[in-house]
Image (tube, grey):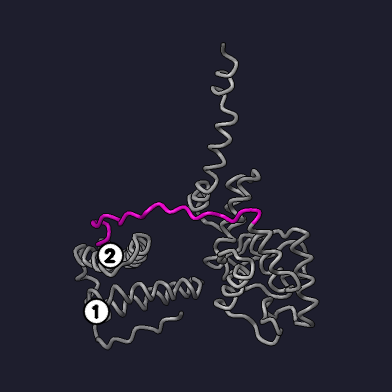
Amino acid sequence: MKHARLHITDTNPLNLCAMVELWLDDLEAGNASTNTITVYRFILNTFLREVGNIPVTDITPQHIRLYLIARRRQGKSPQTVAGNFRTIHTFFRWLCRQGILEANPCDLVESPKREKVIKRALTAEEVQLLLQACKDRPRDEALLLVLLDTGLRIHECLQLRVGDVVQGQTLIVRGKGGKYRFVPLSAQTRVALLRYLKRLGDKPADAPLWWSERGNKPMALEGLKRAVEYIGKRAGVKVGAHQLRRTFATWSLRNGIDLEHLRLLMGHSDLKTTQQYLALVEDDLKRAHEQYSPLRMLKQKLP
């Protein structure tokens, strides 16, 4: 859902509304994604409604605390409140870099704690059910395999063009911040894509890759997300696009990929982001330790 620009009439150029729009314009000039800007605008809208359109120089740590309290009282999850705080912190950090503020008011506010929630990856059996649900549906099969085989973010998948597929064994993907990366494709995924393109018919190289089932309308982001969810409904498996990305990361780690290669494939700028997926294979490590622990082996050999 897109959120319109803020239009609060005020002549003070340092007021919160004006500064938010200036920050978002700067992000757009720096090639931030439309989705990122939309989310940031929504969060700053909630902050504006809480504190009012006051000059940013008048905002204190207490304003930040009261906003976080209000969000919790509105029933927002710890993850949501923590995410709101990070966005506001980033905004005020930008104001400091621009010389508009001398100090970030968020620095004197304790960061909200997040509940540790480990969302699981799909099992091999669930993946098989999803693939079976794509039988005789070339587009859905190609979409499912691309997401499982590459770990692409759903908006990165949406940006693919017909020419990206027919060029060879590797996709060139434009990720967050306008950064490009190479993503290899397995033979099974390439075959599925070729079947889909054959069903789609003649499309120019610069045409969007993903189209409606009739092939007469390019898909939007929400349509692509729904397509994944519908595959899950047919298979009896609850699934979303990000879970496919999580499954790619989890099974890559299980198969022995090193973190740096996984970071590059997933387009993470920080290795810490990639390391979060290690928690998803923790059970695997525990089972391996129980089976192969040297202490366990020694104990079995002792009289």
Magenta highlight: main SS: loop
Q: Where 14 sits versus 131, above or below?
A: below
Task: Report the residue marked by disc 1.
Answer: 53
| Quarter the C terminus occupies | top right
How far separated are the C-alphas under marks 2 and 1?
A: 22 Å
Q: Position of residue 35 (x, y in %)?
A: 49, 73
Q: Position of residue 60 (x, y in %)?
A: 20, 65
Kind of residue indicated by mark 2: Arg
Q: Position of residue 90 (x, y in %)?
A: 36, 64
Task: Report the residue marked by disc 2.
Answer: 72
Say what secondary structure mark 1 lies in. Answer: loop
Kind of residue indicated by mark 1: Asn
Quick check: is 113 in the magenta stretch?
yes
The foreground one among 157 and 294 is 294
Q: Is residue 147 visible?
A: yes
Say what secondary structure mark 2 lies in. Answer: helix
Residue in the image at 56% along x and 57% along y? 246
Quick check: is 218 in the magenta stretch?
no
Q: Where 205 sits versus 242, above or below?
A: below
Q: Is residue 179 visible?
A: no
The disc label shown at residue 149, or none: none
Q: Using residue 38 as the reference point, say whether residue 209 is left or right of it.
A: right
Q: Residues within 10 Å of mark 1 (few under 14, many from 20)?
A: some
Residue in the image at 34% along x and 75% along y? 20
- The span shown in magenta is 104-125
